Image: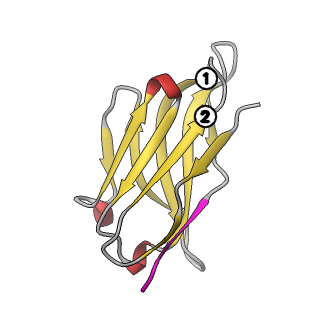
Amino acid sequence: QVQLVESGGGLVQPGGSLRLSCAVSGSNFRINTMGWYRQAPGKQRELVATITGGGTANYADFVKGRFAISGDNARNTVYLQMNSLKPEDTAVYYCNVFGRADYRARWDNFWGQGTQVTVSE
């Protein structure tokens, strides 16, 4: 089965940095787009950033200039570099991919397990 394994979350002080990673299992997995979402307690899940297979990135306004999404196609991995972190960035961050396990499979959305990011003194 397709699995997305996230890592890199943790506790940082305001102004600090973290890099999240999301690795997709399956050597034949084909990615269309990847993205990062986040959800804070009591709030709706929101889109943070996306990147296409061709490398085109898009960002939510609240992270522009601070976050950078990138991908390593050879490793089926997507990263989210987070700089100048603010307390309001505190949330569970989820990796999402739109792709398929192989050419026989249907295109579908897949989700990581989530990783906690806490920005606090």
Instruction: Report the residue that reaches farthest toward the top.
Output: 104
**Residue lying at 40% horizontally and 44% vertically, measured from the top left:** 50
| Residue behind mark 2 | 24
Q: Which mark is residue 68?
A: none
Tell me the magenta residue range: 115-121
Image marks 1 and 2: residues in contact by CB distance under 8 Å: yes
Sequence-first tag of 1 and 2: 2
| Residue 96 vertical placement versus 66 (above, below) | above
> Tag 1's secondary structure?
loop
Q: Position of residue 103 (x, y in %)?
A: 63, 13
Marks 1/2: CA distance?
Answer: 8 Å
**Residue lying at 59% horizontally and 60% vertically, measured from the top left:** 115
- Determine which quarter of the picture holds residue 82: bottom left
Comparing 84 with 57, the one in front is 84
Name the dominant secondary structure of the magenta segment.
strand
Instruction: Report the residue that reaches farthest toward the left.
Output: 65
